[in-house]
Amino acid sequence: MLLSFRVANHGSLREPQELNLVPVYADERPALTVAAIFGANASGKSTVLDAMSFFTTAVRESQARWLPDAPIPRRPFLLDRKSRDEPSTYAVDVLLDGVRYVYGFGVTDAEVTEEWLYAYPKARRRVLFERTGMRLEYGASLTGNRVLIEGTMRPNSLYLSAAAQSGHPQLSALWQSMTSALVIDDRTRRNFALMGAMPAAFMDSIAPPGVALDGVLLGSADLGVQGVRRSATGTTPAPRKEPERAGKGPVGDDLLEAFNAAAVDSLEFIHRVGGEDFVLRAESESAGTRTWLHLVTAAVAALASGSPIWIDEIDVSLHPLLTTKLLRLFQDPELNPRGAQLIFTTHSASLLGTMLGEQVLRRDQVWFTEKDPETAVSTLYPLSDFKPRRGENFERRYLSGSYGAVPVLPDAALEEAIKAIWGTDGEGISA
């Protein structure tokens, strides 16, 4: 499970920021399974997810896919002269098999400046390795052929990525844990638009005997759809062998690659009207139907494997009740026994209130981003900093500006500009 994520000098997150998922209030689990980030447009919400996307990409691909002399594709803060040349840093705390690990690195455009990995088996720190530039120091608890891995590492690649490529038994498990997150952003949604028959194929692969999981997931959303199936005109490629995992189902970029591999197919949606079945292609369905199918498929994949899923603007094309239903899949210990985590951004203030008489989000599951208008620097902070009382109307207080993170709109500026366009006589400006 992810305990925390820290980032500095990434996009508008110039100063060090931390998303801490350790519960503030009583909880049976060591980390929250749901966290929501609220804020105004361009306040830095999506930048938090983009930073996590870069972190997982660097760990997964820096050794295998980044070219030796290519620049590191980071996104430093660009609105001052100093930050462009300073390293960007990323770090996670994770809990794996009951042991806490802290892993992080710093990068410039040209090289990895530092990298570190620590373990805390009995709440005492053990160094596995520490890196400065191309120089590494190892702790006694790191076994295996360390020097051989070091020899394959490049200035622009991570030691952890090189270790996984070399099949290091101890570090490969950590690498897998730190690259299992799926980040759903605009790029991912474009892939989802092409994903073809993958939802049906995936749900078929994990469904219990005799259960049409696609029909259950779609029917539970009241979308008027009884099920989905692969188009008879398409061809489905042979499934790619997935790496061994704690649970079933692909996660992270493995899931996206599997989606793309099935893009030659299209989905057909089955509607039952007046006792008769009608089959419609995916392009005939609403954006809400397709969004729900994509998100709930990814959510079930995360639940099956116990992996994190990060969703930017979760409320796009979804009714608040459907969004709430998705959150509760992760909040329910019976439905989420492996501790999968959902971290998302949203503008939907209704999620701060109650749905069907129940609070949607706990006090320690809510975070905000706010951008300083003078420096254009974003800050990430939790609702718990305000010491909210149980049962407090978070939605009303948020919209009234009590927690910050809401847009400050100039009074009547837009309205006056529109009036000027039309002119004082109401006839409009002539061409």
Image: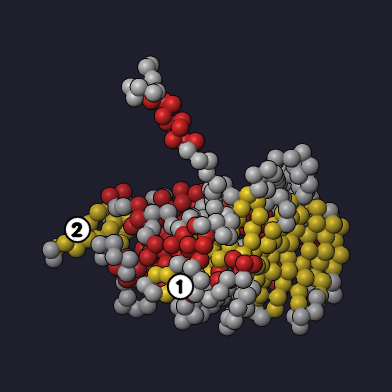
Whichever of callouts 2 and 1 sits on the residue coming sooner in the sequence is 2
Disc 2 vs disc 1: which is toward the camera? Answer: 1
Secondary structure of the residue carrying numbered label 2: strand
Which residue is at 60% across, 78% downward? Answer: 25
Secondary structure of the residue carrying numbered label 1: strand
> Is any part of residue 266 visible from this angle?
no
Residue 123 shows which numbered tag?
A: none
Badge 1 amino acid: Gln
Q: x and y percent of residue 372 in the render?
A: 66, 48
Res 219 quadrant in image? bottom left
Q: How packed is label 1: few (under 14 Cα within 10 Å), some, or many (20 or more)?
A: some
Up/down of 193 relative to 275, above or below = above
Q: Residue furthest front?
A: 424
Residue wearing tag 2? 278
Residue wearing tag 1? 359
Which residue is at 73% across, 69% downward? Answer: 102
Which residue is at 73% across, 57% downward? Answer: 16
Q: x and y percent of residue 347 in the render?
A: 48, 55
Up/down of 102 relative to 345, above or below = below
Badge 2 amino acid: Phe
Q: x and y percent of residue 30 in the render?
A: 62, 78
Report the label total.
2
Q: Is residue 257 left or right of residue 55?
A: left
